[in-house]
Structures are given as structure tokens and as C-alpha cells.
Image (cartoon, grey):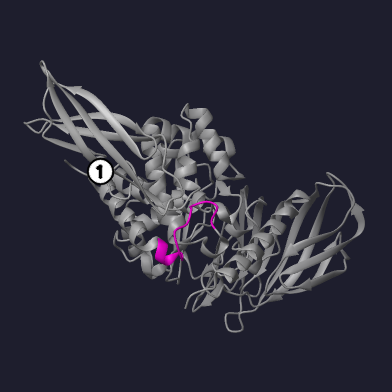
Amino acid sequence: MKRAPLLILLLMLIHQAILAADASRSDTLDIRKTIINFEITDFSTKVIYAKASLLVKAKQNNISWMNFDLEGLITDSVQLNGNNLTFTHNSPDLKVNLPAAINTNDSVWIDIYYHGIPIADATWGGFTFSGLYGFQMGVGFNAQPHSFGRTWHPCFDNFVERCPYEFFVTTTGDKMAVCNGLLIDSTLLGNGNKIWHWKLDENIPSYLSSVAVCDYTLVKKILSGMNGNTDAYIACRPVDTNKVNGSFAHLQESFSMLEESFGPYLWSRVGYSLVPFNAGAMEHATNIHIGTPFIDGTLNYETLIAHELAHHWWGDLVTCSTAGDMWLNEGFASYCEMLHEEYTYGQAAYIKSVKDNHFRVLSTAHINDDGYKAISPMDSLHTYGTTVYLKGADMIHSMRSYLGDSLFFKGLSDFLDQYKWTAISSQQLRDFLSNAGGSNMQAFFSNWVFEPGFTHFSIDSNQSVFNGNSYDVSVFFRQRKHRSMNYYTKVPIEIGFYDAQMNLHIYRAEMNGQCLEFRVQLPFEPTLIVIDLNLKSAMLLPRKIK
């Protein structure tokens, strides 16, 4: 079935309006702390009972009401200092009326009591009860907006609002609750239930908050890093501990790769919780939820483990400010899968992963995503599509060739350090790399990030003229567009010349526009000429030989 273009445009405009309105609340109010008391004991009816206490600070004068997100659950009461407030709850909009207006820098604690059966997204994410498990996946692929913390606690459910969290989760005595941050204590109640107290001091958006309940045990690993040792806890059922040890055998390699690439790990711990989910994982800060099918005792899914850990730099430490810039979360995490291959298995493994990824982009992205699309801004219907994930990784590989390894890794590390705990945009990354690295990245972002399609460079012809003891060599290049709007400019390309003994001599040129004549004087007549021999750029075709 084909979608009518007018309908697609209308849906995109509606989605963009929803997202813009949602983020605007954070210009008026700031949630400074969220404390969640959450009872999840009845796995037969699946009803939860909860109280969320939110410390809210005014950023403007004369605020007489607040609007929170809470979807699929029933609000029982709302209180301020023990006094009931009036409210209306038309899911997901919870409007709370204040007894008196508050002004800039005023702060109030709002207590919201609620219950119900948490909902799951129709496609991916949300809250799920499955057998012995109850768990939250913080995004909804089919939801608008995609951030989906609102299915289990009231919040400003956008990519911009951030605050620390504290959790008091009541379970039956045979189960354990695992949340973000550090486990402070557990308390055994007189009825045999337990309260699990977790605390996260770092600021996160609502969709990165998490809870998972099962008869968990914690497998502990100690990771060596730049700031000393970091504890890693993998929550699993006791029968799965051997599988955890096998599948997480290269967790230290992933951790070291990410620190060396992007700077020290700044979170209180590394954490994963196994959940019965067949469609991947979710990067909740310090408590990644990963599907049990992917922890099978082998290393078959080690790049998935690395991908989710990478979000603690790209997606958790800094977060895209809008869904349209999701490549900053998912493109970088996907690229880190390739870096894991490089760090763990060497350069040849990295190049193979780059080639495999590039092939998938060329062959499937336009099919899966209903056409050739720019990485940014991405429409909200394809936020979690092949273009964002795989083409995003493809373009980051090319960015590395533009900057060179030294500027690439240092520039990205410095960027993360400057913008940590905030929401970011593609334009901020572009401008930072341009200013910090001494290499203007305007052309790169215009060509590779903000426009659809691809480019292709090829050698049309070459000439070699003997001149005394050397050869004057001219190589004529052509650039062809594939569904792109403009010819790419300021593209660095490597040209390799082989002599009769097949020794390689590499020169560098910059491609601007449709054609280029490159001239060089060589002490030999080349027998073979190649471009981009080391596959440093995501060209439509990697190279063409004489």
C-alpha cells in the first residue's frame, strides 16, 4: 500500500507541531527532581499503585497551573503540602491547578497519586508484563512524541527536560526491582514484601528512567577505566548467570574503547537488566534493558551490548534536543559498533563492518524509510529507521576521514565534555567541530547530513607524460550524484599510485563540484591508480581502478 503524499505531509506537520508544543513547557517550568514510589506486586491483574513527587521550579512569572504527561493510568489525587489540588486528566494530559500563582525561581513539591495498568506501545516500547517480568522500555516507536516515560510516571515527556531521580519500588519478597543509579538499600516489610531504594544523582530525561522487576540476581563485574574502577551490574535470573558471563566477555573492551574514543565514563555504574524482549534493547541510563534472546552465552550480540553502552556518551550524557536529530543518539551508537570491532578485532574487522553497513544503507534505507532522506532533520515517522541508524553511522565514518583520527576523536570528546547533561542539535556539533578543530565542517554537514542521497567519485581517465627522469601524471575525476541535491564540496580523497613493483604511493586531493583534474609528478609510470583505497568515505561506490 502506498501512502498519499498529501497525507504524509499533513501527518508530518501535525507531528512537528506536537513535538514543538511539548518541548516548549520546559521554557516555562523546570522539573528539578523526581521521586517515584511504585508498587508492582500483582502480576495477575497487572495493576500498579504509585506516587510521584516532583520538585518543580518556575522559569516565568504568574504560573497558575502545570501540565504533566501521564498516559494510560488513572490519577487519584494531586497534593501540594498535603492539601488536595484540583486537576483534570485527559490522558495523556494532566493539568494541575495551583492554589496561588508562582513566579520565577519559586519551587513547589507536587505529589501525584495514581494507579492502573501501564500500557505498551503498539510497535515498540512502553510497559510490559511478561511471565515473571514487569519492565519499562522508555521510547515508543509508534507514539507521538516518541519519548515514553509517561507510561509509568508523570513527567514532561520530551528530550529536553532533565532531572535526577529517586525510586522506592515495592515488590513481593521473591522479586527484585532494578532502577537507574545505585542501590541504596532494601527494606523487608511485615507482609513479606520488599522496598527497593535506588538513587540516580545525574540529570536524565524522562524516557531514560527505568524499572525492571523479576526474581533477579546481580552479576557483578569491575571495569577498569580512566577514573579508576567502575562497577558493572547485570541483572538476570539465577539460571542465566552463565549466559551473562559468556555474552558480556568483551564488556571491558567496549568500555575501554568508548573511554579512549570519547572521554571518561561519568555515570555512577554500568548496568544491564535482562528482559523478555525480542526487538533489541533500550539505553536507560545505568540500567540498560536488553532482550534475553541476545544474551545466549555467545558473543553473537556483543555489538548490541557495545551499542547500548555507547549511549552513555551519545544519547544519555548528551541527548538530541528533538526527534529530528536522533542520529546524534542512534547514528553514533551504531558507529560505535564498528569501533568495537576495530578495538577488539583490528582494522580489517572495522573495514568489513563499514563495508557491510554501507551495503545495507545503499540497498535498504530508501526502501525501509519510504524514500531517500537526509539524516537530519528526520521526520517523526522515520525517527527509528535505517537512515538514522545505519546511514548515520556511515556518515560518521566519513566525518572521521574529513577530520583525521586525532581531530575526530579529540573534537568529539571535547564536544561531549562541553555539552554534557544537556540536549544538543546537529548545528551545535557542526559549529563546535568547525571552531575547535580548525576544519570548517559546513560543507560536510550540508552534503552528508542535511541533504538526502549519495555521491560517487570515479576516475574517468588519466595521462602519463615522460618528462626527463619523471612522469607528469594527470588524473581526471568525475563526481556523480545519486538522489542528492547538490554536488559535494571540500571532499578529501586519497589517490593511490602503484609502481611496477606494486609499491603504493598515496596523495591527497580535495574534490569540489562535478570534475577535478589532479596533477602530480612521479618518478615512475603508474601501473594502477585507485581512489579511497582504505574506504575512508561513504561514496556510493568505494573506488574505481585504471
For the residue labelled by badge 1, is the local secondary structure a helix, a strand or a loop? Answer: loop
Q: In which quadrant is the C terminus drawn?
A: top left
Please tell me whether residue 371 belongs to the stretch shown in magenta.
yes
Viewed as shown, does residue 335 lie left or right of 430?
left
Above-or-below relation of 410 to 182: above
Q: Residue at x 61, y 50 (%)?
A: 321
Q: Residue at x 41, y 53 (%)?
A: 391
Above-or-below relation of 201 to 284: above
Image location of residue 356, percent across then percent down: 29, 55
Please report the bounds of the magenta region as a residue range: 366-378
Image location of residue 402, percent across then percent down: 39, 35
SS assignment for the magenta stretch, majority:
loop
Does residue 524 appear in this view?
yes
The crowd level at tag 1 (other Cα within 10 Å; few <14, some 14-19, many 20+) is few
Q: Residue at x 30, y 61 (%)?
A: 300
Does residue 336 appear in this view?
no
Disc 1 residue type (three-letter): Gly
Q: Nearer the viewer, residue 455 or 224?
A: 455
Work out which residue is located at the far right of the displayed protein and give it: 100
Image location of residue 427, percent across then percent down: 57, 41
Q: Label 1 belongs to which residue?
A: 346
Image location of residue 271, percent across then percent down: 48, 55
Please tell me whether residue 41 belongs to the stretch shown in magenta.
no
Q: Quadrant of residue 528?
A: top left
Q: Residue at x 70, y 60 (%)?
A: 155
Above-or-below relation of 275 to 401: below
Viewed as shown, does residue 402 lie left or right of 71?
left
